[in-house]
Image (cartoon, grey):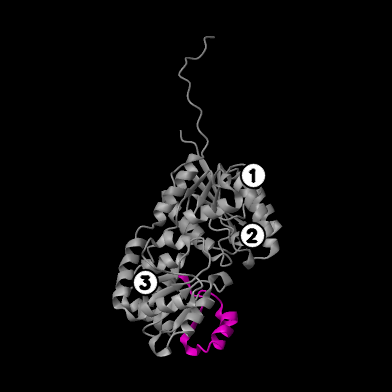
Amino acid sequence: MQSNHTLLFDARAATRDFPGINRYIRELLAALLPELQPDERLHVILPKETEIPCLDHPSVTIHRVDADPTTFRSHWQTFRLVRAVRPQVIHAPYLLTPLRVPGKLVLTVHDVIPLSHPQYSSLATRLFWRLAGRRALRHCRKLIGVSEDALKTCARFFGTRAVRRSVVIRHGVSPAFQPQPKEAVETVRQAYGLPERFLLYVGSDRPYKNVTTLLHALALMDPTASMPLALAGFDSDNSPLRREAEELGLGQRVLWLGWVPEADLPALYSAAHALLFPSLVEGFGFPVLEAMACGTPVVCSALGVHKEITDGAAKLVHPIDRQEWRRAIHAAIISLDWHDAYRDKGLARAARFSWTETARATLEIYRQLYPKPFPHSTNPPPAE
């Protein structure tokens, strides 16, 4: 008779407030479910009013908590849920782990930006990350790093002992991200009022995303030999980048797309001449991988994680060198050979990333932590 294995996945960060973590949670859960064995039961903690369609599955039980995962009430509800479910393995895909509870904790680390780049976080946030991170790393039985770079940074701030039980399991890329047919590209072009040729940025407007460097590089270029830059992924109506673009005299050379539904992203990437991604720090960088998978050449900042992900399949540029960005953008625009070479290299590199493989590697970590069955005795029963 098979014993049942109970898994609990803390998906409280599956909201637009945590864009990269949200994508990770949704893609990983969708890939995990087909890989579950009949004796594995998955419990998922979700915020109120958050829906993940794939979780309508016979092996899944959903538990609801308050929407904001940073509140004490949310932590208390999570603590009580874990005590009630009593899972054998708990997966926390973010630092907001439940209090110490029964079950072996698996923690995913994406980045430690509040510590590695403290200028972008408040004192309270930095203090929380240092205290909560130390506690979570001390209690976790297995640490998953989404990149080698993420684990190295984690070790730098929490010590090498903190990552002694670690493994790198990189993100995948959804099959939806592939070169799109002309009809889909034309539909998204018309929906967003896009020209035939344009450059694209996808992400937030947080300071460490460094979009300001793109604006300044664009301002250094001859308008007659340039392309407009489309900015997508944030509320552009209220963004401080608007004022900066106006002060630089960019006018119609910047297209403000606002937040773009995920369903439109493959066609948007496919429509773009190139993706520009100038971040000063990243845990992984989904847009880089997704653009490559859609056949869109990528110019990105020369971060350790970008070098690791692209492996020569993207043009790497010093993050804050505006002249170097100007030259890279110019080359991307005028050289057909450059465009075709990076398109082909990007497609080949992106094909090596699979959410199915990510899910299988993650499940293998869970299964290593299952309680070991007691060995059956081979000795005869004692005589009465």
Span shown in magenta: 233-262
Which mark's residue is nearer the viewer, 3 or 2? Answer: 3
Q: Amino acid at mark 1?
A: Val
Q: Which residue is mark 1?
A: 101
Per the image, label 2 sits on a secondary structure element best described as: loop
> Which sits earlier in the primary sequence, circle 3 or circle 2?
2
Measure the C-alpha gap from mark 3 to mark 2: 37 Å
The circle drawn on residue 297 is 3
Which x, y percent locates residue 140? 58, 45
Sequence-first tag of 3 and 1: 1
Give the amino acid type for the residue marked by disc 3 in the picture: Pro
Residue nearest the observer in this picture, 225 or 85: 225
Q: Does residue 173 show up?
A: no
Between residues 108 and 372, which one lies in front from this camera angle?
108
Q: Is residue 37 visible?
A: yes
Query: Which quarter of the image is occupied by the C terminus?
Result: top right
Q: Nearer the viewer, residue 81 or 253?
A: 253
Q: Secondary structure at mark 1?
A: loop
Where is residue 332 shown, x and y percent of the image? Answer: 36, 77
Instruction: Report the mark closest to the observer, 3 or 1.
Output: 3
- Asked if labels 2 and 3 touch by Cβ distance under 8 angstroms, the answer is no
Identify residue for label 2: 69
Type of amino acid at the residue the image marks with label 2? Pro
Q: Residue at x 47, y 84 (%)?
A: 220
Q: Residues within 10 Å of mark 2 (few under 14, many from 20)?
A: many
Quadrant position of residue 341 = bottom left
Q: Is residue 264 magenta?
A: no
Left or right placement of residue 285 versus residue 294 in this view? right
Q: Point out the tag, 1 or 2, that comes first from the N-terminus.
A: 2
At a point 58% along the width and 85% down the height, the residue shown is 243
Question: Is 255 a magenta residue?
Answer: yes
Q: Which mark is residue 59?
A: none
